[in-house]
Image (cartoon, rainbow, N blue to C red):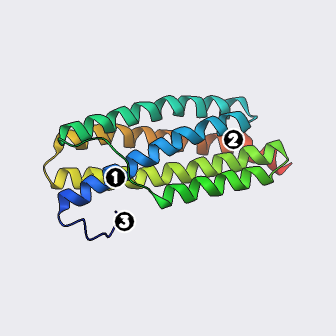
Amino acid sequence: MGLFSKDIKTMEDLHLHGLQDIYYAEQQILKSLDDMIDKATNRELTKAFKAHKGETETQIARLDQAFELLGQKAKGTSCPAIDGILKEAKSIAADISDKAVLDAALIAAAQAVEHYEITRYGTLIAWSQQIGSVAVARLLQISLKEEKVTDKKLNALAQAKVNAKAAQ
């Protein structure tokens, strides 16, 4: 089912599709984090990726709860947007031999992922509230806050250390 599929007829359908989209995205992100952890050379960056892996697992569990609250089976639907972001990150990382530059690229890729998640969670919270799924909105709000904190941490790490080292 595509985002503007004929299978989406109601706001509830759109909301469910959005949940399936972020569910798929979180699972793909979880898979890609191991590769990012392996490639990162800055210890703080590695630590941040490991911490976010744990958060991502928790976010998937929260999404499982959201589906349950809606009486739906937890399942994902393909998300070309996150697939493209992750494919680009992997491609760029494969082309960089300088480890300091690679760390800067990994942060940029991770922030692209974070921004996608922030957008999706923000929209889903609004839709959850609109259709009266306040409990789902509360669950998603926790994940949104985590994504914003992760983005800020990555940005601070890039600005304080990683980008300067890459530029040397």
Label 3 or label 1, whichever lies nearer to me, is 3
User: Marks 3/1: CA distance?
Assistant: 20 Å
Q: Quadrant of residue 62?
A: top left
Question: Is residue 13 left or right of 77 when viewed as pictured?
Answer: left
Q: Quadrant of residue 38?
A: top right
Q: Position of residue 5 (x, y in %)?
A: 30, 69
Residue displayed at 71% across by 55% down? 91
Give the residue pinned by disc 2: 160
> Is label 1 in a helix, a strand or a loop?
helix
Give the residue pinned by disc 1: 122
Q: Position of residue 163 (x, y in %)?
A: 74, 47
Give the residue pinned by disc 3: 2
Q: Nearer the viewer, residue 167 or 70?
A: 70
Q: Position of residue 134 (x, y in %)?
A: 17, 43
Mark 1 closeness class: few <14, some 14–19, many ≥20 residues within 10 Å? some
On the question of residue 138 being in view, the answer is no
Label 2 or label 1, whichever lies nearer to me, is 1
Q: Position of residue 153 (x, y in %)?
A: 56, 39
Q: Quadrant of residue 120?
A: bottom left
Answer above or below: position of 116 versus 140: below
Instruction: Look at the image and tell me in which quarter the N terminus lies.
Output: bottom left
Label 3 or label 2, whichever lies nearer to me, is 3
Q: Nearer the viewer, residue 44 or 117?
A: 117
Disc 3 + disc 1, Cβ < 8 Å: no
Residue displayed at 73% across by 40% down? 161
Image mark for residue 139: none
Residue displayed at 53% across by 50% down? 113
User: Marks 3/2: CA distance?
Assistant: 41 Å
Residue displayed at 32% across by 39% down? 63
> Is label 3 in a helix, a strand or a loop?
loop
